[in-house]
Amino acid sequence: MSKKALTILIIVLAIIIIIFGFWYFNRGQRGDQGEGTNFDFIFNPFGKTTPKPPTTTPPADVSGYVPPPELETQAIKLRKVSSMPIAGFGIFMKERFKEAPNPSPSLPLSGEGNNPAPPAKGDSGGLKPTPPPTEFARAVRYVDRATGNIYQTFADIIDERKFSTTIIPKVHEAYFANKGESVIMRYLKEDARTIETFVGALPKELLGGDTTDNNEVKGIFLPENITDVSVSPDTQKIFYLFLSGDGVVGVTADFLGSKKVQIFDSPFTEWLPSWPNVKTIALNTKSSGSALGYLYFLDTSKKAVGKILGDINGLTTLTSPDGKLILYGNGTLSLNIFHTDTRSSDLLGVRTLAEKCVWAGGNDILYCAVPNSINGALYPDAWYKGEVSFADAIWKIDLKSGTTTMLVNPVLVKGEEIDGIKLALDESENYLFFVNKKDSFLWELELK
């Protein structure tokens, strides 16, 4: 072998040894990951490059949408409450027996163990049962549209039970008051033209028993053809409108119809009342996308009426409990906040009807049923007539922070489209109740 060939051979061997040593050293540093020999590394001493997934940017959302935290999403509980279409519902506190954490085979007796008790007078010192502990829990009552029977269940444990036996067929609207102890039912008489409004007191129930054989609802009838009814915030009074001559008259009364006082009259008959606070009744003209709408405030003590908002096509409104803010929508279903003190408006960037919302957190938070998509139509007329139906998601709008958070989409969670109406919160704001306009079933969303 020539000297030149020997030199070339030595150089090649040296390069192979260096490469093998470099590979072996780095293999020891990286550790054996069970992936076999890393041949790629021999030709790429800087390591294998793992391609990164493309960066995705969420689409811009003018509503300020903020996805809820993962744990919060998992904790959300959306449940159907009623097993039948309902005409209306009311939320109240109901007493029930506590479940014993470690139930014993026999009820402890006073005088045994930790239950000492003196013998009753004239008794020989016999022992008596200790009453089981009780608690108050959130409950809801609702009226069966078909029969007028009242049902009830607890909010945390859905256990629907029939409460009343009084039959009132085809109830269209129902309202509860006086801590769930009074009810208003509205329906058409057999002539299909005359509106009847029945106001009744519910029977007292026994602790531990939700029904009795003769649970009748007894009450009175208000004047015929009452066009609309609104319940006061404390649920102790009602305001109703009825036709008189060519106009309409507004009357306040106790929930059972006594102590009537006329506080309003108008030649215009198309009014939708609501009662945001004790001093104020809001009167909205019936909404149409082809007509200008107006909102007035009626002072219940002074019996004075003042214009608040107007000249808006398709106007729907929802007044805050303190009366300082007005949530309103127009014919495009765009929601705005009107400030009664500065008379200025803020666009929320959410599209729905104001009546598909409810105020919470004092006057800072709104919960709304917001359509996932909106087709072209004359609003809100098409929705009122049933020509258009929505598939809603439940959103939380925080006016202080300016954020809008979608809490749950029933289509994704339950596989069911819900067109939410009659939204209501319990006093502690742990539960949001609403009715599905598509079938009138009652639902609840646990918030905390």
Image: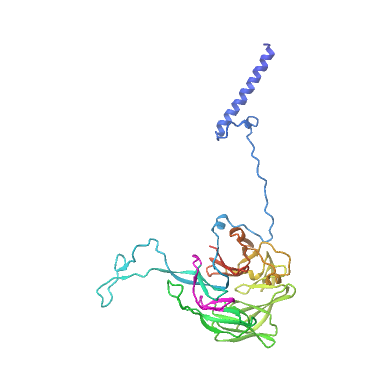
Query: What residue occupies the far bottom of the structure in this picture?
Result: 245
The relative height of residue 98 versus residue 202 in the rendered view (above or below) is above
Q: Main secondary structure of the magenta part?
A: loop
The image shows residue 58 at horizontal and vertical percentages of 67, 53
**Where the N terminus falls, by quadrant?**
top right
Q: Residue at x 68, y 88 (%)?
A: 245
- Given the current orientation, which residue lies at the most extreme top position? 1
Q: Residue 85, percent across and down?
A: 58, 70
**Could you tell me residue 335's position as x and y percent?**
68, 67
Magenta-span inclusion, residue 370: no
Residue 362: x and y in percent read 58, 70
Q: Is residue 342 visible?
A: no
Which residues, given as a range, are shown in magenta? 155-184
Residue 235, quarter of the rendered image: bottom right
Q: Where 10 sits versus 248, above or below?
A: above
Q: Which residue is at 66% across, 17% downward?
A: 9
Q: Is residue 124 left or right of residue 363?
A: left
Q: Can residue 416 be spotted in the picture?
A: yes
